[in-house]
Amino acid sequence: MTAYRYDGTFAGFLTCVWDALESGAEPVEFLLPDDEAALWETRELAADAGRARRLYAALSRRVSPEFQALIARGFLTCLPQKELALLELIRRGLREGDRVRQDLSDPVMAKVNLALTKMWTEWDHLKGFVRFSDLDGCLVGEIEPKNRVLPLLASHFAERYSGERLVLYDRTHHEVFLSDRGRWKLLPGSDFRMGPAGAEERAFRAMWRTYYQTIAIEGRLNPKCQSTHMPKRYRHVMTEFLTDEEMESRLPGQPAKALEKDHTNQLPP
């Protein structure tokens, strides 16, 4: 039994897949650089961009473009040991063709499809729940998603705010989205911290919080309905539920604590 240790990138994963297909290895686990040592033999591979590109192209040519996209998107999910599931699908796809993608009764395919559904739901929610602050002419925001949705959100926000300078930080995966009037890139970043806001930005934040706290009709409060329209797990990075001090004093990598608050009466019905 073999465990693969790689750098966590898609190219690194495809490099491991190439090695497994070539050597006939049957990996039982995929490890990231900081993971503890496995109980079995570990193969540590550096990402090989050339092999990764060739294998990625083969998924489209030998299986289908849709299958290729499924593997790439599946890698962005938070499915536990997603690498093992995707490796199994790649093996079957190269052997059986695109019918593996259409076999919804297959337990591995069903598991990946469910993870993709949850990821796209989170992506759709965050398109509306992201909050930006104007810091010296640059719109800055933070998210803390379960799935690695920042690459999927990037083009949306770059197009939506094509005349602005944007910074959006993923606190879970330590990744930063930078956009300068529609031209954007993604960079790794583990030392990000929201800067202090000016007087005008703080005034707008205060108005937004006041609006949210006063719009609700007390006799029609429905906490369950409120949580459906605005799930609690997104509120800890939303302006409505944080003070300026909470937004600006968090250290890089420090989990937000706003979920400990009771926001039941702060949402409209």
Image (cartoon, rainbow, N blue to C red):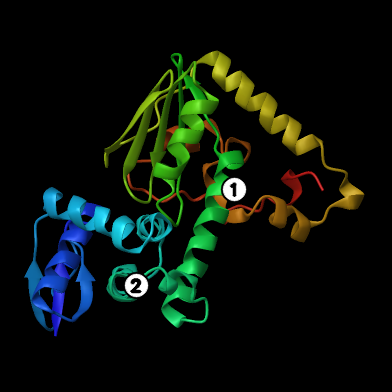
Displayed quadrant of residue 33: bottom left
Element under label 1? helix
**Closer to us: 144 or 101:** 101
Compared with 2, 240 (above or below) is above
Q: Nearer the viewer, residue 244 or 13?
A: 13
> Quick one: SS at disc 2?
helix
71 displayed left or right of 220: left
Please state if 92 lies on the left or on the right of 9 as rendered.
Answer: right
In the foreground, 13 or 55 = 55
Q: Quadrant of the N terminus?
A: bottom left
Local crowd size for mark 2, using a 10 Å CA cut-off: few (<14), some (14–19), many (≥20): many
Q: Reply above or below: 203 against 221.
A: above
The residue most toward the right is 219
Which residue position holds label 1?
A: 125
Q: Residue at x 35, y 55 (%)?
A: 72
Counting from the top left corner in percent of width and height, residue 122 is at 54, 53
Return the x and y of residue 214 as percentages of the image width and height. Answer: 80, 35
Please identify, in this view, whether the residue under mark 1 or under mark 2 is nearer the observer: 2
Reading the image, the residue beneath label 2 is 89
Q: Indicate left or right for 233 with 252 as reference.
A: right
Give the crowd class for mark 1: few <14, some 14-19, many >=20 residues within 10 Å.
some
Point out the tag, 1 or 2, that comes first from the N-terminus: 2
Mark 1: amino acid: His
Q: Residue at x 46, y 52 (%)?
A: 145
- Asked if one can make out residue 230 in the rendered structure from this viewpoint, the answer is yes
Q: Position of residue 242 (x, y in %)?
A: 57, 39
Across and down, in percent, residue 54 comes to 18, 53
In the rendered image, is residue 9 in sight? no
Tell me the residue at 82%/48% (across/down): 269
Determine which quarter of the picture holds residue 239. Answer: top right
Amino acid at the residue labelled 2 = Leu
Question: Distance between the Cα atoms at labels 1 and 2?
Answer: 28 Å
